[in-house]
Image: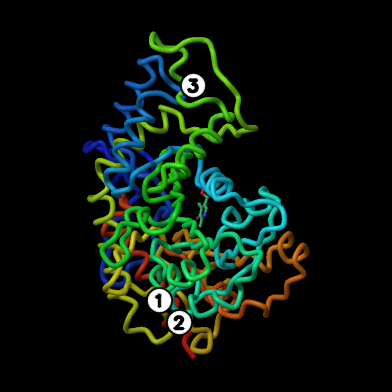
Amino acid sequence: MTTQGRISDEGVITAATGQERGRSRPPRAAFLPFALPHITQAEIDEVVDTLRSGWIAAGPKVKRFEREFAEVIGAQHATALSSATAALHLALDAVGVGPGDEVIVPVYTFTSSAAVVVHCGARIVFADVDPATCNLDPAKLEALITPRTRVIVVVHIAGLPAEMDPILAIARAHNLPVVEDAAHAFPARYRGRMIGTIGDLTAFSFYATKTLATGDGGLLATDNAEYAQRVALMAMHGMSRDAWKRYTAEGSWYYEIVAAGFKYNMTDIAAALGLQQLARREWLLERRQAIAARYTEAFAPYAELETPPNPAHVQHAWHLYMLRLRPERLTIGRDEFIKRLSAANIGTSVHFIPLHIQPYYRDTYGLAPSDFPAALDAYQREISLPIYPSMSEDDVEDVIAAVTAIVEAHRR
Ligand SMILES: *Cc1c(COP(=O)(O)O)cnc(C)c1O
């Protein structure tokens, strides 16, 4: 039995695994965390190499990570950043969002997707989501567009790509750029195209729990050279390009500030993690896919449970496994269900508390819970189950046993 968070002989940080169990699978001995990064000796060696190199801020590894990431997704430009929140902020800056503008944002997302609109001095126009996918509903989009609309933000919730073809058709008809919040969606595909090559600018997150983890980190991908230039400039103080080279032999002490920029760069320490995670992306994805497939196979027979969609025209990144309850078939609600999973030593989370019921957005925009019925309904029934590459087969079976036992004990 391995211990949680320890590096095993294979150099892999493994989650705790329970003892051998019979068919009844009594509760786990140790708590199964909701999420863990997957760090091998390769990441550790790459970080140590960085520490010994003298370049611990933005340097050559950031540049290499940008090149390799762009190559993997097939984008022309990639700027590595401190977070997806920074990437989203810079994306809105690049397309010129400012006071008087409106930005359409789906309500079923993390606060970052919307807060950056406020940072640009613009107004958020919230959109409800497709009840099946929890992604921006193209059918509800057109009605939200006004002469003030400046950009449409799309979020690929859980790693399931949004319906980009109809969304882009509407955006193009109104001459609007599309910014994608792909914090969950690496590596994901929509109709064969990698996420990061479809909309005008795409923001990725490398936060500790995401599918590629650098501690904190993000990246903005685009095929538009002008956007890419503006992003690189604003990410580094508005300082004339490649200012980091000024401390090398080829550089000099001189720089120019041409805009009031931000400090949003990635560090070489984070890029070191990113390079090794990127190299292992296929294995990491396969592990997530395998866990998702096993969950869906196990839960599909239960009418009390709604398994997440995984249509054939996408490659799902499986950042989250968003299970939904059918409360009319159960005697307990979602919150009680989560308490029972916790008592069975299974860590869970809820994605997402829709923004229109968060105090800031509710009060600023005068929103009522019923304003976005699909998002509210999804939220009230949702439980995110653990899904990460270091979960053992036993861990996965423990989750399934705990969920199905609770259903069986509380069905109507
Ligand atoms: C995690 C997340 C972000 C923010 O990512 P950071 O890298 O932590 O800034 C943005 N949007 C969504 C949907 C997220 O889940």
Work out how far the residue at label 1 is from the one at label 3, CA to CA, in angstroms. 58 Å
Q: Is mark 2 within 8 Å of ligand 1?
A: no
Q: Amino acid at mark 3?
A: Ala
The kind of secondary structure element at disc 3 is helix
The kind of secondary structure element at disc 1 is helix
Q: Which residue is under mark 1? A: 405
CB of mark 3 within 8 Å of CB of mark 2? no
Among numbered discs 1 and 3, the one appearing first in the sequence = 3
Residue 134 percent location from the top left of the image: 48, 72
Q: Amino acid at mark 2?
A: Ala
Residue 121 percent location from the top left of the image: 71, 51
User: Residue drawn 25% across and 40% down?
Assistant: 279
CB of mark 2 within 8 Å of CB of mark 1? yes
40 sits to left or right of 115: left
Quick one: 180 or 352, which is closer to the camera?
180
User: Residue drawn 73% across and 72% down?
Assistant: 367
